[in-house]
Image: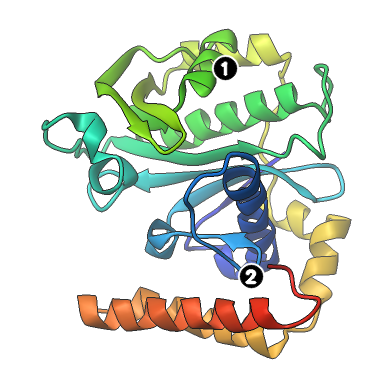
Amino acid sequence: MILVIDAINKEKFGGVLDEMFRLRARVFGDRLGWQVNVANGMERDLFDDLDPAYAVGLDDQGEVVSCVRALQTTGPHMLADVFSDILDGEPPLRSATLWESTRFCVDTKRLGRGRDRNSVSYATCELMIASLEAAKQAGVTDIVTVIDPVMDRVLKRSGNAPYDYVGKQADMGKVPALAALLDCTDERIERIREFGGIEEDVFISDEAALALPAIKALSEQPNEPQDDLAKYCKEQIAMASTDEERAAALALQDALGTIIRSRPNCDA
């Protein structure tokens, strides 16, 4: 089940977003060893402060098992501002009908092998389908995504092969990276559905998601002081109107993460 979280409904699903950021920390920080910012056990970057849309995969209990982020390319995005070496001197891609897909990950520890609903394969296909269908519904025609060669092979195996690439392959940390282009077409979606054996609607409504046991438990947890401070930091980052204000808000957020990690029994 895929829950779409954006600026409109994010206040309902703060706990789910925190679990998503924790999954990203385990995948990109721990497993893949990327140079990412992890604070209080959660991986976030400056693009998460721009109110992107997230597709979050949930199991039957409401536990987070996968996620991906969508950014508009008309503003700041990773290919333009982080992975610009891939562009090899070409100007950044900018279009209202082109979205950037980043931070695609699946919880390989919680999910098993095979092809059933609780498998890595199913969760991967479900997330791909949701990304394409949500983009298509929003009037987006194409997606650009920065991937490594392993993910490139996953896309090709699942019927989601890129139709083209942008720029060149470039070294980004431990692995090379390339920018792939995907068209948001019914034909592409159908190929992934056929590969994954997925015929049903992959989305879950806000109301149904809020009724799931794990999400209900998250919403019933009382806010601790550091939760309120973290929320304040996010608000200050979002409200910053100058580079100086944004830098000060980010510094406060980092300082809060350092304080929390220094406490015993914290999730660092």
**Can residue 266 be seen at all in this image of the molecule?**
yes
Q: Residues within 10 Å of mark 2 (few under 14, many from 20)?
A: some
Label of residue 168 in the image: none
Q: Amino acid at mark 2?
A: Asn
Rendered-image quadrant of the N terminus: top right
> Which of these two is toward me, 131 or 154?
154
Q: Nearer the viewer, mark 2 or mark 1?
A: 2
Q: What's the distance in space between the residues labelled 2 and 1, CA to CA?
A: 31 Å
Which residue is drawn at the image coordinates 57% and 76% (left, top)? Answer: 257
Q: Secondary structure at mark 2?
A: loop
- Where is residue 118? Give x, y as percent: 83, 30
Picture quadrant of residue 265:
bottom right
Q: Which mark is residue 154?
A: 1
Q: Viewed as shown, does residue 142 lie left or right of 199?
A: left
Q: Is residue 138 visible?
A: no
Residue 241 position (above or below residue 85)? below
Report the residue that reaches farthest toward the bottom: 225
Amino acid at circle 1? Val
> Is 89 drawn above or below residue 81 in the view shown?
above
Residue 138 in the image: state x and y as whole percent: 40, 39
Label 1 crowd (10 A; few <14 / some 14-19 / many >=20) = some
**Percent of width and height locating residue 237:** 38, 76
Label 1, secondary structure: give it.
helix
Residue located 64% across and 47% down the image: 30
Going by the image, does 50 lie left or right of 134? left
Q: Quadrant of the C terminus?
A: bottom right
Disc marking residue 40: 2
- Which numbered disc flags the more N-terminal residue, 2 or 1? 2
- Residue at 79% in and 60% down: 215
